[in-house]
Amino acid sequence: MKSVCVCFLLLAVSTALAADSVLYRLCKNFVGAQNMWKAEGKCPRSFKQGEEAACNDLENFKPPYENDEQERNIMMGVMGCRVTRCELTDEYCESNKATLDRLSPKQSRQ
């Protein structure tokens, strides 16, 4: 009986994950990669010349955005910066899920 419950639980989780947007899943994958680097003692990672200043500019950028593409690019940049600093959290992904879903490329379902 326990194995049946576990199978249904895994099915429910995988179904829920499949419904998430590309950008939300990417955010969660970044968190997973970052956690792996932390476990290996490779955090924080090094910035190349000029990247840290660019990250600070991205993180300090205030709306309004010119369009969705600019907002998406800024959010992706901020996620990359936070991963490099080992500061990206599940909470960040969750609190920005609605925005990540809205800005995600739409997937065609066949």
Image: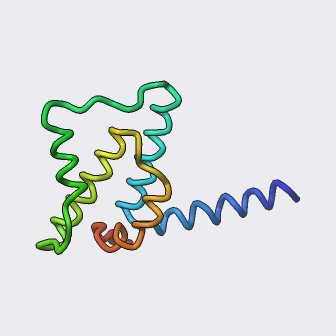
Residue 74 in the image: state x and y as whole percent: 21, 59
Residue at position x 36%, y 61% from top? 22
What quarter of the picture does the N terminus occupy?
bottom right
Residue at position x 45%, y 47% from top? 31
Q: Quadrant of residue 64?
A: bottom left
Q: Quadrant of residue 73?
A: bottom left
Q: Is residue 80 left or right of residue 90?
A: left
Residue 98 in the image: state x and y as whole percent: 40, 73
Q: Quadrant of residue 44?
A: top left
Residue 100 in the image: state x and y as whole percent: 35, 67
**Where 44 sits versus 21, above or below?**
above
**Where 40 sits versus 90, above or below?**
above
Residue most extreme to the right:
1
Residue 109 in the image: state x and y as whole percent: 38, 72
Q: Is residue 72 left or right of residue 79?
A: left
Residue most extreme to the top:
41
Using the image as rendered, state which of residue 25 and residue 75 is in the foreground: 75
Q: Which coloring applies here?
A: rainbow
Q: Is residue 5 left or right of residue 94?
A: right
Residue at position x 70%, y 62% from top? 9
Q: Please count the marks in the image.
A: 0
**Where 12 sits versus 83, above or below?**
below
Using the image as rendered, state which of residue 57 and residue 77 is in the foreground: 57
Q: Is residue 53 left or right of residue 1?
A: left
What quarter of the picture does the C terminus occupy?
bottom left
Using the image as rendered, state which of residue 90 and residue 5 is in the foreground: 90
Residue at position x 42%, y 57% from top? 25
